[in-house]
Amino acid sequence: MLVLRRLGQALITLAGAGVLVFAMLAVTPGDPARRVLEARGVGEPSPPAIAAMRDELRLDDPLLARFGSWAADAARGNLGTSWRTGRPVSDEFAARLPATLRLTGAALALAVGTALVLGTTAALGAGRWPDVLARGIALAVLVVPSFVLGIVILDLVVVRAGLGRVIADGTWATVFLPALTLALGSVATWSRILRTSLLEAGSATHLRVSAARGAGPRRRLLVHQLPNAAAPFLTMVGLGTAALIGGAPIVESVFTWPGIGRYTVEAINARDMPVVVGFTLVAVLTYVVAGLIVDLVCAAIDPRLRS
Amino acid sequence: MSILTRATPRVRAVHRPLWRALLARPAAQVGSAFGLALVLAAVLGPLFLPDPDMPDYADQLAPPSAAHWLGTDQSGRDLLARTLAGARTSLGAAALVMALAAVIGLVVGTLAGAIGGVVDTVLTRLTDVLLGLPSLVLTLAVVGVLGPGYANLVLAMAVTSWAGIARLARAVARGARSRPDVLAARMAGVGPVRAVLRHVVPGVAVQVAVAATLGLGEAVLALGGLSFLGLGAQPPTAEWGTMLAAGRDTFAYAPWQLIGPGLGLVLAVAAATLVGDALRDVTEPT
């Protein structure tokens, strides 16, 4: 029942996003047929050629029919034709998606690991120096914007000290610095949530019983508090994937990472709407699916959320 | 009359301790000091400084000195002047974004909460869809439609960031429907529209204003980030993100170019974060 309701919600959000995004595509000024032809090297497209391309892109169909065929195409993974290169958007994305997945995957792992360490340290030593230190680190990484940090790391540390490679090529060898930059923004929020929910779980009565039976603070934290604090933390991580996807264009641009985020920024500057819309759809889909998975996992591990 | 005169001080008594409790917290003190300093510097600074857009090709990439406290950029422009002009741009634009988002959120939320029924269902669905989408990604998409530029970026951010405010406004307006003073006004013959405008909206507006103020830090951050990508303010406009983008080729041997815009962004975000944290601690004691 909960699965069905949550699935319905996710579908409504996706449908809403689809309508929103198609509207953006439809209201963008300029003739897509002309742009595609020019991108394919036709200097001054003749009126018949434009008419033929308009027919091929189905631009003269009624709006509702266009939406229908566009949505059906998008559902099958066909995101249309780039107005800048004249090639299918899906092909352009497929070539760049591995780099972006590598970056966001590495950032997600780094962020979860660091947040776990900082959050549990702060909760274990609540009110004492480990807490103050961990919270200070969280606040510091929270207030330094990722692109400022990226610039400092890349343009000052790497270039001056001659460490690592300045040009990232999208492989595992160069992923650490961009992933760290991308991760730090989320670490702050996640570790703060984890600390709060650990402390909240620690105030439960059964923990006093557990302490009375001789369990030390470390055991209580790992065996009793952490599972209870897992649901809010996982929810935060699920929502945080949005921050990672949304932050990818900025971090990819700072580090010249050859992923879909940087490609999308180039597309925005060139007003290449099918690519922009394609990125939005991919990001929204990832976000909605991540949220769905997290909610279902939370319901599975926490009976209190099932009522 | 006697009831009214007695009622007035009691309302104030409810509000005052919140401000006092807030300002008693060191985090809120530091945060509001940062914010105040930034605003003062943005407003007053440019009056005492050289033209931020005036190039001086005899004095390019000069390190910080008595003449140029933060040094100069690759066109010999004074970086302190550009940083403070950038503060005007960034803070002004962020305030505009949040003001627009607050108005949209206030109208949508109050309509949904006060009218209820089908209007509520439709508006709440719309709000939920927007809240269910990553806002930075949506902003990028809207900028794609409108084209890069600072005015377009401000507009794009406003139309993608009102949903959270609308949800808050709806909750407050909904709660106000059954409040004794609103019911009393209705029974005294005040029309529904007037009752909402006079008795519901003021309470909603206070909450919305607080939420919008706390959103300023994030707005400054997003404006800076997207301008850094070339999607917002365009050179030669002095804006923190644009300044960071312009100096990138020369940072390695002229790192002082980072100080102004970097510190400005950090202070703005820190101010909003610290005050927001303190406010949450005061309003939701754990």
Image (cartoon, coloured by chain):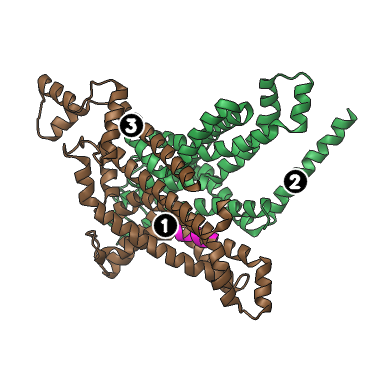
Chain colours: A brown, B green
Q: Earlier in the sequence, mark 1 or mark 2?
A: 2
Query: What are the residue bounds of the magenta stretch?
Result: A186-193
The answer to whether residue A291 is seen in the rendering is: yes
Report the front residue among B6 and B93: B6
- Look at 56% across and 69% down and name the residue there: A122
Q: Is residue B50 visible?
A: no
Outermost residue toward the bottom in this view: A214
Amino acid under label 3? Answer: Phe
Amino acid of disc 1: Ile
Q: Which residue is mark 1?
A: B259
Tell me the distance, in whole angstroms, between the alpha carbons under discs 1 and 2.
39 Å
Q: Main secondary structure of the magenta part?
A: helix
**Residue B26 place in picture, x, y as percent:** 64, 59
Residue drawn at (82%, 39%), measured in percent from left and top?
Answer: B9
Residue at which label 2 appears: B16
Q: Are marks 1 and 3 in contact (CB under 8 Å)?
A: no
| Chain name for mark 1 | B
Question: What kind of element bears circle 3?
Answer: helix
Q: Residue at x 49, y 38 (%)?
A: B128
Task: Give the amino acid at mark 2.
Answer: Arg
Q: Chain of mark 3?
A: A
Q: Of the residues tagged 2 and 3, which is closer to the observer?
A: 3
Q: Which mark is residue A22?
A: 3
Between label 1 and label 2, give the one nearer the viewer: 2
Q: Secondary structure at mark 2?
A: helix
How crowded pointer 2 is (Cα within 10 Å; few <14, some 14-19, many 20+) is rated as few
* A59 or A211: nearer the viewer: A211
Q: CA distance from mark 1 to mark 3?
A: 42 Å
